[in-house]
Image (tube, helix red, strand yellow):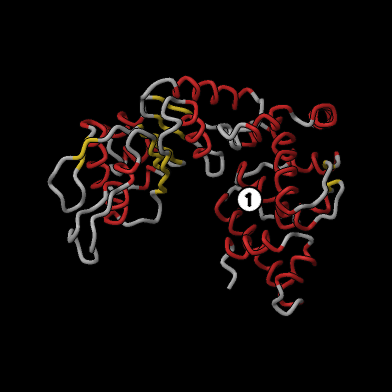
C-alpha cells in the first residue's frame, strides 16, 4: 500500500494526472478515469464495440459507471452526433415503462390526452441506454425482444408499425443467469442483448485507480465549491486505498465531495473525510444502496443543522459551509430539503 501511495503522490506532483486533464477536456470519457489493467480491458472492449452497431450488455455492481461507459461507447461511435437517451428501468410500473419506451397514442388509456413519442422513437439514429434491464417485467421483455428482432414497434394503443434505427446498450447489476433459471428473464432476450459483453470491475479490484480518481474528484468539487485545494495528504490516500468501496466510484465521489465541503484546505486531510463513511458496520458495509442512503442522510443533516443555525438564510449557511450559495441551492434541491 505504501508503494502505491508513494507512486501516486509522485505522479500527481509531477504531472497532476495527464489522463485526468485529458478527461476534463474530452467529455467522451466523462468519469472513465484510471489506468488499471481491469479498467483498460473494459475500455478496449468498449472501443471495439463502438466501431460496430451491435447491442452491448454492461454488467457491474452499483456505482461502477455503467451509464458513463454507455455514453463513452456512443460518443466513440459514428452515432455521436445523434441522441443518447438513458432510461432507468427500476421503480417504474410495466405500463409506465412501456409508455416511456414505446410511446402511446392519444386515448390509449385514461389520462392519455395527447400522442406521446417514446424513447425509442426520440432516439432515432442514436443510442438508447436501458439501465437495470434485469428489472423489467416479463411482458415488456417480450415486446423488447420483438423490437430487437424486427427493429419496429407499435405505440401503446396503436396498430401502425414504427421503424427506427437505434442502438441498444443495456446494463444491470443483477445476475441474469440466475434470473433466467428462475424464469424471471427471457433467455432469448438475454442472447439478443449479450452480443458484446463488458464487465465493469468494482473499485476494490482496481485500487491503483483510487488515487487518480480521488484527485480527479478533489479538483472537480473544489472548482464547483470555489475552494482552494492543492491535493491530499498521504494519510488520506492510505485511508482511501484501504477501504473496500462497496458503493464503488459513486461512493468515492460522494466521500470526496463531502470532504471538500467540510474541509478548509489547502490539503485534504484524513480528518476531513466523513467519519460515518469509514465506520459503517460490517453487515452494512457491503450494501451499496444503504451506504448511499447514509451519505445522503449525513449531508442532509449537516445542511439542515447549518440552516437552523442561520435561521434559514441560505446566504449565511453557504458562508458557514464555505461554499457558493448556488452550489448550496443545488444540494438543497438534490437532497429534497424543504
Drawn side of residue 338 relative to residue 320, left or right: left
Judge by depth and name the residue closer to the eye, 38 or 222: 222
Location of the C terminus (image quadrant)? bottom right
Percent coordinates x, y for residue 39 in the rendering: 59, 27
- Residue designated by label 1: 285
Percent coordinates x, y for residue 240 in the rendering: 75, 42
Percent coordinates x, y for residue 269 in the rendering: 84, 48
Location of the N terminus (image quadrant)? top right
User: Residue 49 occupies which quadrant of the picture?
Assistant: top left
Drawn side of residue 179 relative to residue 236, left or right: left
Write the residue at 59% across / 23% down.
40
Drawn side of residue 135 relative to residue 250, left or right: left
Which residue is farthest bottom?
A: 311
Write the residue at 24% across / 36% down.
147
User: Mark 1: which secondary structure?
Assistant: helix
Percent coordinates x, y for residue 198 in the rendering: 47, 28
Judge by depth and name the residue closer to the eye, 118 or 205: 118
Write the residue at 59% across / 47% down.
286
Q: Quick check: 314 above or below 214?
A: below
User: Residue 274 occupies which quadrant of the picture?
Assistant: bottom right
Judge by depth and name the residue closer to the eye, 154 or 242: 154
Number of marks in the rendered image: 1
Tell me if mark 1 has few (under 14), some (14-19) or many (20+) residues whose alpha carbon lies within 10 angstroms of its own. Answer: some
Write the residue at 50% across / 22% down.
47
Amino acid at each position: 500500500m505504501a508503494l502505491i501511495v508513494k507512486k501516486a503522490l509522485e505522479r500527481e506532483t509531477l504531472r497532476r494526472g495527464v489522463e485526468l486533464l485529458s478527461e476534463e477536456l474530452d467529455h467522451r470519457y466523462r468519469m472513465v478515469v484510471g489506468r488499471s489493467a481491469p479498467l483498460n480491458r473494459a475500455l478496449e472492449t468498449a472501443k471495439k464495440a463502438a466501431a460496430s452497431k451491435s447491442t452491448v450488455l454492461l454488467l457491474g455492481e452499483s456505482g461502477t459507471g455503467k451509464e458513463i461507459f454507455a455514453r463513452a461507447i456512443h460518443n466513440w461511435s459514428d452515432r455521436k452526433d445523434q441522441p443518447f437517451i438513458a432510461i432507468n428501468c427500476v421503480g417504474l410500473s410495466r405500463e409506465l415503462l412501456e409508455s416511456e419506451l414505446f410511446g402511446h397514442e392519444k386515448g390509449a388509456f385514461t389520462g392519455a390526452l395527447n400522442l406521446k413519442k417514446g424513447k425509442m422513437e426520440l432516439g432515432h439514429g442514436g443510442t438508447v441506454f436501458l439501465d437495470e434491464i434485469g428489472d423489467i417485467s416479463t411482458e415488456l421483455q417480450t415486446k423488447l425482444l420483438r423490437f430487437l428482432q424486427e427493429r419496429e414497434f407499435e405505440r401503446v394503443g396503436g396498430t401502425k408499425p414504427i421503424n427506427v434505427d437505434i442502438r441498444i446498450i443495456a446494463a444491470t447489476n443483477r445476475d441474469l443467469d440466475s434470473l433466467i433459471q428462475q424464469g424471471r428473464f427471457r433467455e432469448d432476450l438475454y442472447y439478443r442483448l449479450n452480443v458484446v459483453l463488458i464487465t465493469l470491475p468494482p473499485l476494490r479490484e482496481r485500487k491503483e485507480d483510487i488515487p487518480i480518481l480521488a484527485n480527479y474528484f478533489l479538483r472537480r468539487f473544489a472548482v464547483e465549491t470555489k475552494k482552494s485545494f492543492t491535493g491530499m495528504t498521504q494519510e488520506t490516500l492510505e485511508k482511501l486505498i484501504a477501504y473496500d468501496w462497496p458503493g464503488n466510484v459513486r461512493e468515492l465521489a460522494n466521500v470526496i465531495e463531502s470532504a471538500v465541503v467540510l474541509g478548509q484546505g489547502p490539503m485534504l486531510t484524513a480528518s476531513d473525510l466523513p467519519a460515518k463513511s469509514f465506520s459503517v458496520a460490517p453487515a452494512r458495509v457491503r450494501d451499496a444502496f444503504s451506504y448511499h442512503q447514509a451519505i445522503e442522510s449525513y449531508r442532509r443533516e449537516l445542511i439542515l443543522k447549518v440552516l437552523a443555525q442561520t435561521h434559514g438564510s441560505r446566504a449565511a449557511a453557504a458562508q458557514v459551509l464555505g461554499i457558493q450559495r448556488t452550489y448550496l441551492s443545488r444540494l438543497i434541491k438534490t437532497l429534497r430539503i424543504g
